[in-house]
Amino acid sequence: MTAKIYRPAKTAMQSGKAKTQFWLLEYEQEVPRKVEPMMGYTSSADTRQQVRITFETLEQAEAFAKRNGIEYRVILPKEAKRQVVSYTDNFRYNRLQPWTH
């Protein structure tokens, strides 16, 4: 019974960082999923995969895992490298590539 503790990245459908400030504890898959032949649903006998516990800090998540005897691994978030670009740079006279429309 191992778990991973991580901070989720923003989804591709959002531009802001909503729901990314909390830490999640999620159990890793122990039993492989299988396709149910009659309906084609994907199912698993492992119900721990459905459990996602939210914490405000990494320390709280680690303390919870230690207190309950859960083996865990921490996945640290990678901060996005933002490049500050000005819109007016598109119209500079000394651009490397000429502006065309």
Image (tube, grey):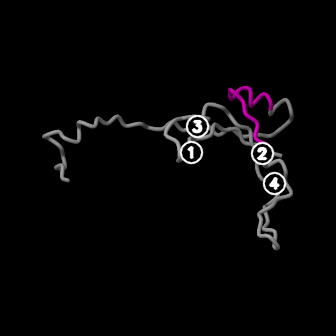
**What residue is shown with label 4?**
30
Stretch in magenta: 51-64
Marks 4/3 in contact by CB < 8 Å: the verdict is no
Q: Residues within 10 Å of mark 2 (few under 14, many from 20)?
A: many
> Upstream in the sequence, badge 4 or badge 3?
4
Q: Amino acid at mark 2?
A: Tyr
Helix, strand or loop status at disc 2: strand
**Residue 25 place in picture, x, y as percent:** 74, 38
Crowd class of label 3 (few under 14; some 14 to 19; many from 20; radius 10 Å) = few
Q: CA distance from mark 2 to mark 1?
A: 21 Å
Q: Are marks 2 and 3 in contact (CB under 8 Å)?
A: no
Q: Secondary structure at mark 3?
A: loop
Residue 4 relative to residue 7: left or right: right
Residue at coordinates 76% horizontally, 43% vertically from top-left? 3
Q: Which residue is mark 2?
A: 27
* Kind of residue sitting beneath label 4: Glu
**Can you say whether 22 is above or below 3 in the image?**
above
Q: Which mark is residue 21?
A: none
Disc 1: which residue:
11
Residue 32 position, x and y percent, is 79, 61
Mark nearest the camera among 1 and 4 is 1
Give the image location of residue 55, x and y in percent: 72, 30
Residue position for label 3 = 77
